[in-house]
Image: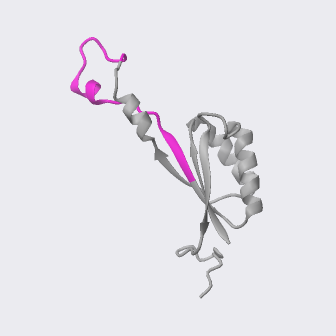
Amino acid sequence: MSYLVVFVVDEIEHCPPLFDAWEEIGVTGVTILESTGLGRIRRASGYRDDLPIMPSLRNLLQTQEEHHRTLMVLVENKDTIDKLIEVTENVVGSLNEPHKGVLFVLPVLRVVGLPDWDSGWQN
């Protein structure tokens, strides 16, 4: 069985060492998306103390959104998932602590478009 690992990185400065750690255990082909959460958007649209004395319309509309990175990768087995979680926590800290990120794993029943990927699909 194949698996999709999705990791929302809370602090994007963790990304470069995280990519190195994942590559060291053989995890490649990571898709990286810029993302942010609804709670952060709502907090960012509140009171602003960073405006100049004479703000322009651009200053008023500009938000201070905090961005995350959402990483997605297909892996072939549960051993790789365990290694991936271990090296991830070595980089970012325990995922059970606040503001470290969220990682989840989903089974993948079929992969189309990656000719070398064995998705275990049975007719």
Where is residue 75 shown, x and y percent of the image?
67, 63
Q: Is residue 118 magenta?
A: no
Where is residue 109 shown, x and y percent of the image?
59, 74
Relative to 14, residue 27 above or below = below
Relative to 37, residue 121 above or below = below
**Quadrant housing the C terminus:** bottom right
- Residue drawn where x is 24% and y is 14% of the image: 54
Query: Which residue occupies the foreground of this view, 6 or 14?
Result: 6
Where is residue 21 shown, x and y percent of the image?
72, 47
**What's the magenta bit mostly, secondary-structure-wise?**
loop
Relative to 69, residue 76 above or below = below
**Quadrant housing the N terminus:** bottom right
The number of numbered badges drawn on the structure is 0
Query: Which residue occupies the foreground of this view, 3 or 68?
Result: 3
> Is 20 on the left or on the right of 73, as rendered?
right
Q: Quadrant of residue 62?
A: top left
> Is 57 on the left or on the right of 90, as rendered?
left
- Residue drawn where x is 41% and y is 40% of the image: 38
Q: Is residue 94 visible to us here?
A: yes
Q: Is residue 54 magenta?
A: yes
Where is residue 52 shown, x and y percent of the image?
30, 14
Q: Quadrant of residue 59?
A: top left
> Is 56 on the left or on the right of 5, as rendered?
left
In the picture as drawn, the residue positioned furthest to the top comes out as 53
- Residue drawn where x is 46% and y is 33% of the image: 66
Q: Quadrant of residue 101?
A: top right
> Is 95 on the left or on the right of 70, as rendered?
right
Q: What range of the chain is rendered magenta? A: 49-71
In the picture as drawn, the residue positioned furthest to the left comes out as 57
Q: How is the image coloured?
A: one colour
Q: Is residue 64 visible to us here?
A: no
